[in-house]
Image (spheres, rainbow, N blue to C red):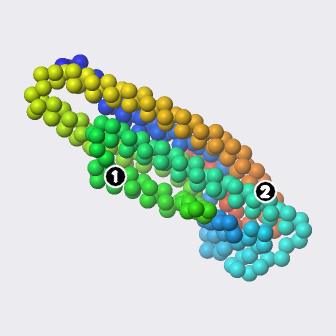
């Protein structure tokens, strides 16, 4: 009996490890980050700086600052076109990678609980997951062809997801522990003479689930990591284009969005 209970607990603990690894796999986006408020849709791209001013670039590369048109020469126009295109590909890529990474972790939580308890997650665990989604939504959003990126988004994701999973763990552990104890109590109350076999079977199912989820999560995060490596190249190219544009149009300096990623000691 002790062996069966120990096996069950080991399998249970492995579920918690899987949840942590799902978030730990959120890819880092090299040494650059996008810092600012950026909105992208098919017609316009709008950057909002700390002072609340707006730089708008239309899809045909017209430039406006606070709705006032800016006259550009041929050289500046080419730089605006390049910058506009870089942002239109980079911002959606960042939003997609970040939101997909978060969903991998939240989906793992739901799958683990449902597999153990045989029911959807309870309200307390669902509320904890929705809190994470709400926090992410203040920085990132996508709606059809519109993408929004606000604040030091990449820094927030790299440093904030560790805290997010720590905040989620108590609800997850309490919910899954309750489900495990309920299943165990039902087995005891049923008078089943083969309780040890039930515990062994439960532990075996959790071990199988752990392996399946780990394989699934690794496959998904490996794809995200490949996308993040490609994105790193995009952001580096964007940074160079932004510098050239600011050199040609100093009035756009206050709208810079590419920043060197802060080191852990500076967060």
Q: Residue at (23%, 25%) from the top-left corner?
A: 199
Q: Which residue is mark 1?
A: 126
Q: Residue at (17%, 24%) from the top-left corner?
A: 195
Q: Residue furthest bottom?
A: 68
Q: Residue at (80%, 59%) from the top-left corner?
A: 82
Q: Secondary structure at mark 1?
A: helix
Badge 2 density bin: few <14, some 14–19, many ≥20, Cα 10 Å: some
User: Residue 126 location, x and y as percent?
Assistant: 34, 52
User: Residue 97 location, x and y as percent?
Assistant: 58, 48
- Residue 151 is at least partly visible in this image: no
- Residue 217 is at least partly visible in this image: yes
Is 225 left, or right, of 193 in this rendering?
right
Picture quadrant where residue 184 is located: top left
Can you tell which of label 1 and label 2 is closer to the viewer? 1
Lower position in the chain sequence, tag 1 or tag 2:
1
- In this view, the residue in front, 73 or 198, is 198
Q: Which residue is mark 2?
A: 241
Question: Where is 43 relative to 267, above or below?
Answer: below
User: Residue 228 location, x and y as percent?
Assistant: 63, 43
Image quadrant for the N terminus? top left
Question: Where is 27 relative to 82, above or below?
Answer: above
């Amino acid at each position: 009996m002790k062996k069966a209970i120990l096996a069950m607990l080991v399998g249970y603990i492995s579920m918690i490890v899987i949840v942590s690894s799902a978030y730990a796999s959120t890819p880092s986006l090299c040494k650059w980050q996008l810092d600012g408020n950026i909105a992208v849709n098919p017609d316009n791209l709008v950057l909002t700086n700390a002072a609340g001013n707006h730089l708008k670039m239309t899809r045909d590369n017209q430039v406006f600052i606070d709705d006032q048109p800016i006259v550009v020469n041929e050289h500046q126009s080419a730089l605006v076109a390049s910058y506009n295109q870089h942002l239109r590909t980079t911002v959606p890529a960042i939003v997609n990678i970040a939101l997909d990474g978060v969903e991998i972790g939240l989906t793992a939580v739901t799958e683990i609980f449902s597999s153990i308890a045989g029911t959807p997650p309870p309200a307390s665990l669902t509320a904890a997951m929705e809190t994470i989604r709400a926090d992410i939504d203040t920085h990132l959003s996508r709606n059809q062809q519109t993408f929004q990126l606000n604040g030091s988004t990449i820094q927030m994701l790299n440093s904030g997801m560790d805290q997010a999973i720590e905040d989620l763990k108590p609800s997850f552990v309490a919910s899954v522990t309750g489900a495990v104890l309920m299943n165990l109590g039902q087995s005891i109350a049923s008078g089943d003479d083969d309780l040890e076999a039930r515990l062994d079977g439960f532990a075996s199912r959790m071990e199988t689930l752990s392996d399946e989820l780990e394989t699934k999560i690794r496959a998904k995060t490996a794809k995200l990591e490949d996308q993040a490596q490609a994105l790193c190249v995009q952001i580096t190219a964007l940074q160079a284009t932004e510098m050239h544009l600011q050199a040609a149009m100093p009035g756009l300096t206050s709208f810079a969005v590419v920043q060197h990623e802060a080191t852990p000691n500076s967060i």
